[in-house]
Amino acid sequence: MTKSYNIAVIPGDGTGPEVVAEGIKVLKAASGLSDFDLAFTEYDLGGEHYKATGETLSDDTIESLRKADAIYLGAIGHPDVKPGILEKGILLNLRFSLDQYINLRPVKLYEGVDCPLKDKGPEDVDFVVIRENTEGLYAGAGGCLKKGTPDEVAVQESINTRKGVERCIRFAFEFCRKRNREKKLTLCGKTNVLTYAFDLWERTFYEVGKEYSDIATDYAHVDATCMWMVKNPEWFDVIVTDNMFGDIITDLGAMIQGGMGIAAGGNINPEGVSMFEPIGGSAPKYQGKGVINPLAAICAAQIMLDTLGETGSAVRIEKAVQKVVKERLASLSAGKMGFSTSEVGDMVTEAL
């Protein structure tokens, strides 16, 4: 019997609808070559919706999204909306409400892509960052006192629970085992300064690690992690870290894999609905010009299929992207690819 998946689509802002259209084009082609069907339901969320209604994300919409098999997101961010409103009201709200407690970010350099690191190639840059996605500094705990005065005090607290930390670490061990590459898991933290939060992370990491004797473990401070990601990225296989540090090092990872045009990730709830997105944002200056690179959105679709269990089709999409990058594109940068957004989507579809 043919499997069927209901995919909630949030095209979002700026160039989001353009890259999502190419991702859906590739997804439809991939499903046509396999034994599963995809049904897409679009949700009008983002800056224009907020400007028209004053609403970011309703409870009814969250409940509707909860029923999907996966969420495919283009981008959130509008130049006419104050920074933080859409990000907190939509992105963080979805992650927290749907308990998407894992942020999964592959950092992989494809052949033919220019790497800013001297003498580093695809064999050197191939690791995954697993970031805790619902706690830490992003939990929103804290407040202000005497705001706008010389005596103003601002407090932002990092919330780390044993449950939240352990389920993230356990996911990382399982992922490292499934990935079956170097079978090494690195904890990235700051135990010498953040002595309470990362004492919990470190103790949990090594306690859980006793159950995974086949996985080598090590630790690196976040500043050292940034240094080694640039100097010796081949040292890393899988990195697990907290919300804030993960947010920072994954942007560094995006640059060493070739830029935002190829970087994609997933917000994962292993027991519920997960959301997949390109990392580069809405890029409003390129909106409507047909020059934005859709490969990050296509790679997000690939991660989505892999997470849904359609591994064969996910591998097929990745190989098609690799072929197009190696043989056809002049650059991964917007306006410099040598082809339009839709033409790149067509090439990936043909390469399937």
Image (spheres, grey):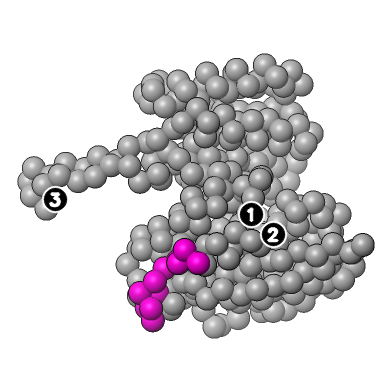
Quadrant assignment, res 155: top left
- Residue 348 in the image, given as x and y percentages of width and height: 78, 69
In the image, residue 328 sits, relative to residue 157, either above or below, namely below
Which quadrant would the C terminus be assigned to in this image?
bottom right
Spatial separation of the CA atoms under disc 1 and disc 3: 39 Å
Asked whether, in this view, residue 179 is left or right of residue 280, the answer is: right
Query: Tag 1: Cα neighbours inside 10 Å, few (<14), some, or many (≥20)?
Result: many
Q: Is residue 245 visible?
A: yes
Dot 2: what SS?
A: loop
Circles 2, 1 touching at the beta carbon (< 8 Å): yes
Asked whether, in this view, residue 317 is left or right of residue 187, the answer is: right
Please name the residue that numbered disc 1 is placed on: 273
- Residue lying furthest right in this view? 1
Dot 3: what SS?
A: loop
Asked whether, in this view, residue 262 is left or right of residue 302, the answer is: left
Please name the residue that numbered disc 3 is placed on: 147
Q: Earlier in the sequence, mark 2 or mark 1?
A: 2
Quadrant assignment, res 36: bottom right
Between 200 and 119, the one lying in front of the other is 200
Please name the residue that numbered disc 2 is placed on: 69
Q: Earlier in the sequence, mark 1 or mark 3?
A: 3
Q: How many marks?
A: 3
**Amino acid type shown at disc 2:** Asp
Spatial separation of the CA atoms under disc 2 and disc 1: 6 Å
- Residue 38 in the image, given as x and y percentages of width and height: 77, 69
Between 210 and 299, the one lying in front of the other is 210
